Image (tube, rainbow, N blue to C red):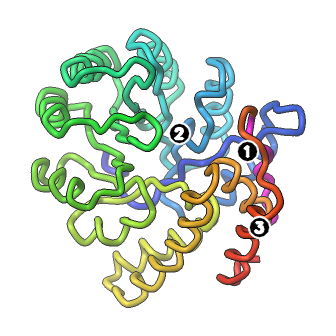
Amino acid sequence: MPMLEGIFVPHVTPFDEKGDLDEEALLQLVQIFEEAGLNGLVTLGSNGEFPYLNFEEKLRVVELVLSGTHLPVIAGATENSTRETIRLGRALSDMGVDAILVGPPYYFRPSPEELYVHYSTLAGALDVDLILYNVPKFTGINLPLEVIDRLREEHSNVVGIKDSGANMGRIAELLRRSGGEFRVLAGTADVMYPSWLLGAQGAVVAVANVVPELCAELYGAFRKGNHERARELQLRVNLVNEVVVKRYNQISAIKAAMGLRGWRAGRPRLPSLPLEGDALEDVRRTLAELNLL
């Protein structure tokens, strides 16, 4: 997947006051991200609230995004059974997504061998590029490096990983083991620039929902070798990330921050609640400090 580099936004799914998909708002957000200079979109990722969407809603969200952008689109297909993951993955592949992002089953804790069999079965059943999704914050599972090695060596369509563990040592080891063909993407904003210095090819970061222009500029500065500007931008992005992604329910905080910037991100879907009170004011102060309001 040659386009798998740069900044991909794992974008939110906007819902209206009734909790239904706001299709017009979604298309507006896709346009905002494209105009900000991002390199691609990740639909149905964690920030897209995929666990709260049914099968038909997932397909509709992807259909809308594909219709509204010329950027590469990676679609999430993380289900708790291998069978359902294949079902969703095939539907997404048929729709024309560029790749699918697959996190591990997260209800019954799989063993390393079960993780290997799950992903290996997917790779054999799906005619589309697969990106592994390591997100211990939500799943409680750190994909073992040995499992990743087996998968990338045995399946040509296992093309990369989004690693959201925020562990530079692990990212360095992934890069050392995999060489240049297997794509390693930072999955947390605070390690973007450091990971690129070691050879990672890009990032898929929640904070790109809130400051897409800063993330795009950061990657551009890095690519141009303007390391002083890249370091400066990394620290600015870190401040937003600390408040919006780490301090509160990140879905609620991200949507609140986007709303403060004048974008129709909508409400989170229950059981998540909208950000209010002191938490909302904290987000407002942070955006004001960076002259983003």
Rendered position, 145 above or below 122: below
Please name the residue that numbered disc 1 is placed on: 26
Q: Main secondary structure of the magenta part?
A: loop
Res 34 visible: no
Q: Position of residue 229 (x, y in %)?
A: 43, 87
**Which quarter of the figure is the N terminus placed in?**
top left
The amino acid type, in three-letter code, at marker 1 is Leu
Give the residue at the far right of this rendering: 17
The amino acid type, in three-letter code, at marker 2 is Gly
Please name the residue that numbered disc 3 is placed on: 261
252 left or right of 168 in image:
right
Label 3 element class: loop
Q: CA distance from mark 3 to mark 1?
A: 16 Å
Please tell me which residue is depicted at 40% across the width and 23% down the height of the picture.
Answer: 105
263 inside magenta stretch: yes
Q: Position of residue 22 (x, y in %)?
A: 81, 38
Taking depth in this image into account, of 79 and 127 the one nearest to the observer is 79
Res 122 visible: yes
The residue segment tinted magenta is: 262-269
Taking depth in this image into account, of 293 and 250 the one nearest to the observer is 250
Nearer-N-terminus badge (3/1): 1
Give the residue at the far top of this rendering: 83
Please name the residue that numbered disc 2 is placed on: 45
Q: CA distance from mark 2 to mark 1?
A: 14 Å
